[in-house]
Amino acid sequence: MSRFSIGVDLGGTNLRVAAVDESGTLIEKISTNTQVALGRGAVLDEMCRIIQSLAARFNSRGPLAGVGIGVPGIIDMESGMLRESPNLPGWANYPVQQEIERRLGTSITLENDANAAAFGEHWLGAGQTVDSLCMLTLGTGVGGGIVLDNQIWHGMTGMAGEAGHINVEPNGHPCGCGSHGCIEQYASATAIKRMAMEAITSGKAPQLALAMKADPEFSAKAIYNFAVQGDEPARKIFEDVGRRLGIVVGGLVNLLNLPMYVIGGGVSSAWDAFAPAMLRELQARSFVYAATNSDEHASHKTIVTRALLGTDAGLFGAARLPLLAPEAIAKEARPA
Amino acid sequence: MSRFSIGVDLGGTNLRVAAVDESGTLIEKISTNTQVALGRGAVLDEMCRIIQSLAARFNSRGPLAGVGIGVPGIIDMESGMLRESPNLPGWANYPVQQEIERRLGTSITLENDANAAAFGEHWLGAGQTVDSLCMLTLGTGVGGGIVLDNQIWHGMTGMAGEAGHINVEPNGHPCGCGSHGCIEQYASATAIKRMAMEAITSGKAPQLALAMKADPEFSAKAIYNFAVQGDEPARKIFEDVGRRLGIVVGGLVNLLNLPMYVIGGGVSSAWDAFAPAMLRELQARSFVYAATNSDEHASHKTIVTRALLGTDAGLFGAARLPLLAPEAIAKEARPA
């Protein structure tokens, strides 16, 4: 009998829970809204109820390897505390791991959602053929996750992978993290909307201005549609996104020399609008990228590519965690 | 009998060779000029002559574990080729490893000089207490090296660690690597001299202008001396160095969450002139730095510190390579 595990992607908007078998086959997936307004206790109650119902439903299938949970924000791996989480207001300094384990009566594996997404893409998505990768998740914010030698790189306290807060403009737009000019301020859906607003305010984007008048909530996707239709101000926004991403990914290539960099999250659907500028910038900015992608290195190219699993990356990555847990635990228990 | 090894730091100016025992004790060190003008063959002949004389002299002491050689530039680990090396003109695409091994009649371990320096500081310097670190070597250029879980992180082709070519000013000063605004252009000795020249040209640095008239070759060290004596334009240059370093190290902290970042190389002697601005910037820019250095994390602080081994870091790091070689070879031989 094949083992299975339960993965959870606990987002600020959606709560998704899946049962996945060892080979990565999805057994069942349950999606619901995250009722953040009801408070963190209620959200965890609902989540644990779904986990337990899935566990009970499939317990004849094989042993449950465990539960892996991806949450947005900064997790302190040692204490299982959520230190900061812009998408889960009121959850800062909440002992998430302990609260979940108390409800389930069993230990779980907690992970940052962007790390889980990177791990998911490594398992079943774009990164199946490489042993190391770095993924940027372009959503409301910009998350990041690093997989080195087939394991998530956690760093000293589990806070590694925050590539969204690499600087790309020293005196740039203020960022929620306290800095200015983080890539999150230039390549997230939020940033794309802000840049559109700036273009509208400057009077340089008449089509976007009309669209916003018709729908004040207009989205990054709407701006992308204008870009695809050739609207110059919209096109420029995505070109800027690409240029900024190229600078940051170029730095990652020079620093880490990984075989693959994966761009995921909702904004990655606009790949054709920003990727040409990104790849151009990479070639010009990163001599490691240029060297590895020259003819002599045909077998060791640096690949920069789109994520393949869409919104399921984090769910699959979370489900993978308990399947590998003994190894991960051994790694953490090792003396410093 | 304790094993010993021979480490080499082959620089564009100095050629240094040392015999070091397993415990890290220096047995003997030989320093000479690198006669680059005589051509690469002559340089390697001289280097191999010194290696062989040291090996013969101490062969009664114990078995020679091997020879480790640090060279400046980008090394392709698989082929042992030096791909680019600004400090060794004419050595690009030279099969350095093969040429040395032919002369010595034995295999050697080749390493980028900044990686070797990081490995040396990890063994015997600032990083003895941590299992992972990233080191920036601020010299003529800015080199970088990453040690993860007690091993040099080489990346896919051995080109990892090029932190000197992380961007800090998107449209900044052109860099030898082809990009613009790399940290190398704002924190190297070369950059400090350029910034002094810019201040002189703008008419804003009368003291520096007089000094340069007296000594057209005036060095980063001379500029540092002015800064220490309170010369405002000189002080501002080092404050800018610190600010730029803070932005880049802040990005490294957010990305890698390592326990330690080491600043070495000649410019690190000016620590007191640039470090306050660097640490201020780090605190403001990197929420991972701020979080780990808050009171709750007393046992897991992010340490940013000066290198301790001075110019010997690379020499010791190179000597350590053959002492660990079996493990390193096993790691490289592992299928991708």
Image: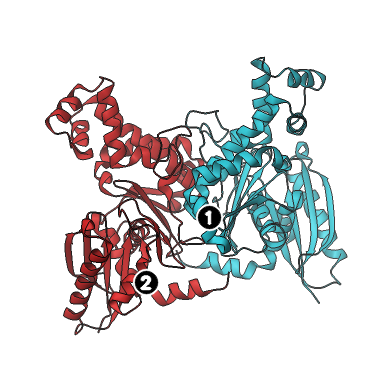
Chain colours: A red, B cyan
Total numbered circles: 2
Q: How crowded is mark 2: few (under 14 residues within 10 Å), some or many (20 or more)?
A: some
Tell me, for residue A215, which label it has, or none.
none
Which part of the image, by quadrant, shows the N terminus of chain B? bottom right
- Tell me what residue is drawn at x 75 percent, y 49 percent: B310
Q: Decide if residue B48 is on the left or right side of residue A46.
A: right
> At 48% across and 43% down in the image, what residue appears?
A251
Residue nearest the observer in this picture, B86 or B27: B27
Q: Give the labeled residue for mark 1.
A: B294
Q: Are marks 2 and 1 on the same chain?
A: no
Q: Mark 2 points at which residue?
A: A98
Name, please, the residue furthest toward the top.
B203
**Residue sticking out furthest to the left:** A214
Is residue A182 in view?
yes
Do we see residue A256 in this rendering? no
Q: Which chain carries label 1?
A: B
Q: Is residue B235 above or below residue A263?
A: above
Tell me the chain of label 2.
Answer: A
Image location of residue B64, percent across then percent down: 77, 68
Callout 1: SS: loop
Residue A9 placement (x, y as % from top left): 27, 62
